Amino acid sequence: MVNRLEKDNSQHHLKMENQNKSDPLMSLIGVNKSYRNNGAHIDVLKNLSVDIYSGETIAIVGESGIGKSTFLHILGTLDQPDSGTLLYKNADVFEFDKKKLAEFRNKIMGFVFQFHYLLAEFSALENVLMPGLIKGFSAGQIRERAEAILVRVGLKERLTHRVLDLSGGEQQRVALARALVLNPAILLADEPTGNLDKKNSRQVHDLLFELNDEYNMTIITVTHNMQLAEYMDKQMTLVEGKLVEIK
């Protein structure tokens, strides 16, 4: 019987060959981003360019403070660069107006960040329904999918519990379920297993790769969990403001 890692390694070469024959799903071109801190000018991203392909899985690793989250926020259009271009299927995303950009994020992106931004007084299920409601679905239309994804992240018995009554690890899984409920083309995750124990981390790992297999979902995650990073097609880090592949 072929184990998960052996299967992933065998599929990796075929996936990369197919990607080399296709156009990138997203491209960052010449991106620069800097901040001012106590009067000091800090360059975080410097002339950063990278192509990201459909179905690719990428782990961004490295020490805190090197710009990993900044990169993720720009890729997710939650922040804008000082200069540079973000293309999605050859469309210049930062040329979109605010409404079109918000629609793009809701339709294409799923987000899991360290701060969950869950609605504390709402139930786990109500939180996971939210992206579908924003998109225009009725609660009835999206409920079955929301319940199913909560079950897949191990929260079958917690659907109606308010977020404030859940543990930190359970809240992390609600945030993951919310990000996945609309089957986004791209999942952006900042430490998706950071608050989870070993068993639940393993469950989240498996779920991410099941979704990658089932839906060809592109996954980019910032993580200090090297076990998760090892499963990814690529491991990258930031060196002097540029992405460098280390695997």
Image (tube, grey):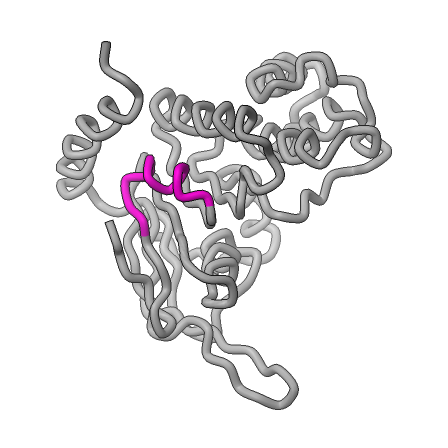
Q: Is residue 22 left or right of residue 194?
A: left
Q: Residue at x 17, y 26 (%)?
A: 10
Q: Residue at x 33, y 39 (%)?
A: 230
Residue that sits furthest to the top in the current view: 1
Percent position of residue 139, x then y: 72, 19
| 226, 211: nearer the viewer | 226
Percent position of residue 45, x then y: 42, 71
| Quarter-of-image position of residue 138 | top right
| 19, 197: nearer the viewer | 197
Q: Is 213 within the magenta? A: no
Percent position of residue 24, x then y: 26, 47
Q: Is residue 40 above or below residue 153?
A: below
| 61, 122: nearer the viewer | 61
Q: Is residue 17 visible?
A: yes
Q: Is residue 134 visible?
A: no
Q: Is residue 206 left or right of residue 23?
A: right
Q: Is residue 102 left or right of residue 23?
A: right
| Quarter-of-image position of residue 234 | top left
Q: Is residue 146 above or below residue 91?
A: above
Q: Which residues are magenta?
A: 225-235
Percent position of residue 202, x then y: 48, 26
Q: Is residue 225 above or below residue 205?
A: below
Q: Is 232 within the magenta? A: yes
Q: Is residue 21 left or right of residue 109?
A: left
